[in-house]
Image (cartoon, rainbow, N blue to C red):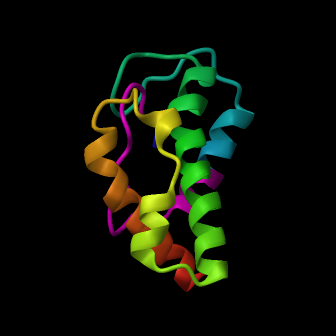
Amino acid sequence: MVHVDRVQGVIPVSHTGRWLDNFAALEALQPARLVPGHGQVSSLARTQADTRNHLQALRTHMKKAVDDGTDLGAAIQSVDAAPFRHLHNAAERHPGNASRTYLQLERE
């Protein structure tokens, strides 16, 4: 559920909305340290920056694209990925993560 220093993979069985709900439950616990699935032992603030913020940005952008009837390809191209480019594998994961998030939101 938590990744640090890298972009998480939104795979076909992932659901970004439930992922964020689970992350919110984790935040409510206010842990001093987290051991992520990938990356270094980290603070809550760091995992929020690297995991939660990325998922929220994808969902916000893709929700607007779905609501506006934007073509999937155009929606993927127009995501502002700059805040997450410093993360390992961001360039490789971005198109697939954006695509799967769009398709999830179409079904919601």
Vertical position of residue 66 compared to residue 95: above or below = below
Residue 39, percent from left and from top: 35, 24
Residue 78, percent from left and from top: 50, 59
Q: Which region is colored magenta? A: 2-21
Q: Quadrant of residue 25?
A: top right
Q: Quadrant of residue 26?
A: top right
Is 80 positioned to the left or the right of 91 in the image?
right
Count of all numbered marks drawn on residues in the image: 0
Vertical position of residue 94 compared to residue 99: above or below = above
Residue 45, percent from left and from top: 63, 22
Is 105 positioned to the left or the right of 93 in the image?
right
Residue lying furthest right: 28
Magenta-drawn stretch contains 64: no
Name the residue at 63% across, 70% down: 63
Residue 30, percent from left and from top: 71, 25
Name the residue at 49% across, 71% down: 102
Is 68 positioned to the left or the right of 6 in the image?
right
Assign the magenta stretch its main secondary structure. Answer: loop
Vertical position of residue 4 compared to residue 14: above or below = above
Name the residue at 45% across, 70% down: 74
Which is nearer the eye, 44 or 72? 72
**Where is the C terminus found, in terms of image quarters?**
bottom right
Name the residue at 65% across, 80% down: 68
Magenta-drawn stretch contains 4: yes
